[in-house]
Amino acid sequence: MSNKKIQMSRMWKYFIEATVEVIEEEGINQVTIRKVADRAGYNSATIYNYFDEISHLVFFASMKLLKGYVEDVALYINRGKTPLEKYLLAWECFCKHSFLQPDIFHAVFIMDLGDQPEKMLEDYYEMYPADLINIPEELQPILFERSMTKRGKSLLSLAAKEGQLEENRVDDINEMTILVWQGMLTNILNNRLDYSLEDAERKTMEYIRHIVNV
């Protein structure tokens, strides 16, 4: 790695770790460029040499805060014997963690990041390769995929190939399950539903199982 790349990586991490601190201490909605710069020990203008906008800082910091989910999902999926079982277990894990950290999951999977969110995921794992050490190789491609549509479709397509569901249901199931989760999470964040986080998790999984029809 060149000296310039090392310096860029070091600065990048300073700002991301500072953003993580703000999120943990004050909440994701309290993140500002000035707060991050002050914690990192630099002026606000310096941040824009490394990040285009504050949403990118929030995204990368939120990725750091997904560590528990990333470690857990492999354990969940390994309990499944068929692609459809693995799909439902993956959703179970996703719901469990997303309703515990709704702001964080919104920042990673829903928030508008501009034109190249997948490139941002690649950049993240290039800077933090250790985050992939304990992740099974077959799951690593999924972690580079921010698109909810593409993440879910792979297991459903395998299930269709094994005759667990009709091929023509794959896209519909995939889209409907994502919309159920997005709708529930957004309603919870906007205080539109009088559900506890546990209720939201349980109801979302009920709807997903109903859609899949198992």
Image: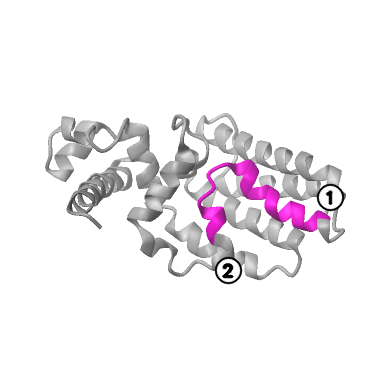
> How far is the residue under mark 1 from the one under mark 2?
24 Å
| Residue 48, percent from left and from top | 23, 32
The answer to whether residue 63 is seen in the rendering is: yes
Q: Is residue 37 above or below residue 114?
A: below
Q: Which quarter shows the N terminus?
A: bottom left
Where disc 1 sits, the SS reads loop
| Residue 87, percent from left and from top | 70, 56
| Residue 129, percent from left and from top | 37, 61
Q: Name the main secondary structure of what is drawn in magenta.
A: helix
State the colouring used for the structure image: one colour
Which residue is denoted by mark 2 in the rendering?
Answer: 75
In the image, residue 67 lies in the stretch drawn in magenta: no
The residue depicted at 87 percent of the width and 49 percent of the height is 166
Q: Which residues are magenta?
A: 140-160
The residue depicted at 60 percent of the width and 43 percent of the height is 148
Mark 1 surroundings within 10 Å by alpha-carbon count, few (fewer than 14), some (14 through 19), many (20 or more)? few
Q: Is residue 192 left or right of residue 52?
A: right
In the image, residue 143 lies in the stretch drawn in magenta: yes
The answer to whether residue 96 is seen in the rendering is: no
- Tell how many labels: 2
Please tell me the numbered disc located at residue 213: 1
Q: Is residue 92 above or below residue 101?
A: below
The residue depicted at 35 percent of the width and 57 percent of the height is 128
Give the camera-side residue of 24 and 198.
Answer: 24
